[in-house]
Amino acid sequence: MILKDDEILKKKFQIVICGSGPAGISLALELEKKKIECLIIEAGDEFYSEKAQSRYAGEVYGNFPEDLSVLRLSQFGGTTGHWGGTCRTLDDYDFQNWPIKKSEIDPFLDQSCKILNIPKSFREKNISENLKIIEFQESEVRFYEKYYEHIKKSKFINLVLNCIVFNIKMSGNTVTELFLKSTKDISIKTNFMVLACGGIENSRLLLWFRENNKEISKDLPIGNYWMEHPFKKIGSGVGNFKAIRKSFENNFESFENFRNWGNFTVSISPTQNLINQKNILNSAVFLTLHDRNNDSFKNNIKDLLCVAPSLSNNILDLFNKDLLCGITLSSSWEQNPQLENKITLSSSKDFSGIPLTKLNYQLSNLTLNTANEMVKQIGNYFIEKDLGRLGAYKTIENVSSFISEAGYHHIGGTIMGNSKKSSVVDKNLKLHNIENLYICGSSVFPTGGHANPTLSIVQLSLRLGEHLVKKLKTI
């Protein structure tokens, strides 16, 4: 049901969800199944508006690739309004530094796949001791298109648009009141509050709430350990296309890669053995074949220089340096959590009076070492199987000059854990020391793996819904 400002004042909602992206809507759908009424507060409108989007502006320090205001959408359905739809589960070993195991979110995979309209198929096949090929799924779901009319007709999910959660009031360790800004300033009460505003906004709002509520501990690392998935073309080469296709043969769901390059793509990841042995991070490398005219002298020379660039610098000058080689390696991979990568509050404020975001971001040597090691490992596999030759690009050699081509997967900032000194929420996504404030979304991920986060976000949201249903029974 869509409500106006005055209408939300007429009753107390047991659960208030801030944000209408995948996290907030998935949680609301789970509560609806249990016939529990909730309210979703969305700061944006039904569709895109420049005013709402202006709240996503911010300052960036370091080598983050994009303007913060263009990476997210402040509207119903959140950033699913322009997401790519790529989905995969996290690996078992991605949970080594989480307070929960993968098996604790696996029970929610079926329902998550239904929400995203994707098959529950994320197969993998080891091709060597160090490498495996993996399967992705592609969701075409836009949460507005699938769920707006559903919520509009729902008896249990209420939605208010163009409404900003400006602040909270606390009594002891409990949130007692939410202060909202819309056509007018209003306040509401609730039993449980859930921040589900995205991988940047969750930190920004929680930092702002802490400035106004001393009950939220200053020791919590709110905003810290912020991460992303770097994306870059990391190498190229030459090879026997027929032999390559046969070597990587599989019946996985067809995946055309992030940028729809080429004519054939296979997704390659490190095994746990390689991660442990070489001390690298998780990674997905997309090996793509580009059909060529083999009679073309230009292509043959260019392909040769991909794997033997020292042969002649003069030859390069004769041709367009942007021409692709016959084989391209692109990658989306894990970034390790670092305390100094963080979201803080800017001195500038949005139109509601909340400070804008300030992001400090720098990749580590470990992150680039992972990309280089993956090129090396796949290159060794090519030599071993007599498939061709591969070489790494120089763009992944220097961390200070590296700029990712993505910037859309916002992870960390309110990470989950058991320690109140190194995490923000507990394993049930409850803010440490606060009884009824929960955080949901990729901001709670302690590490990011390589998989696109949306599927895992939905799984965690459904798990939180189950937890809140149990908590309500104790009231």
Image (tube, rainbow, N blue to C red):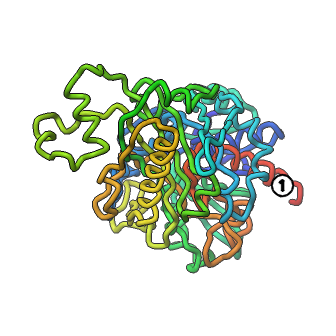
The answer to whether residue 305 is above or below residue 190 is above
Q: Residue furthest right?
A: 474
In the displayed structure, does residue 45 sit left or right of residue 102? Answer: left
Q: How many marks?
A: 1
Question: Could you tell me which quadrant the N terminus lies in?
Answer: top right
300 shown above or below 359: above
**Could you tell me which residue is drawn at 37 percent across and 51 percent down?**
68
**Residue nearer the viewer, 42 or 129:** 129
| Left or right relative to 145: residue 329 | left
Residue 469 visible somewhere in the drawing: yes
At label 1, the amino acid type is Leu
Q: Is residue 2 left or right of residue 211?
A: right
Closer-to-camera residue (80/322): 322
Question: Does the rendering let one see residue 183?
Answer: no
Secondary structure of the residue carrying tag 1 is: helix
Residue at 66% x, 50% y is 91
Residue at horizontal 62%, vertical 28%? 250
Q: Which residue is disc 1 drawn over?
A: 472
Residue 148, percent from left and from top: 60, 29
Q: In which quarter of the image is the C terminus?
A: bottom right
Q: Residues within 10 Å of mark 1 (few under 14, many from 20)?
A: few
* Image location (x, y in percent) of residue 198: 53, 51
Q: Where is residue 421 in the image (x, y as percent from the top left)?
A: 62, 78
Closer-to-camera residue (167/28) = 28
Q: Which of 376 and 268 is in front in this view?
A: 376
Q: Which residue does the image show at 49% across and 62% down from the upper left?
A: 226
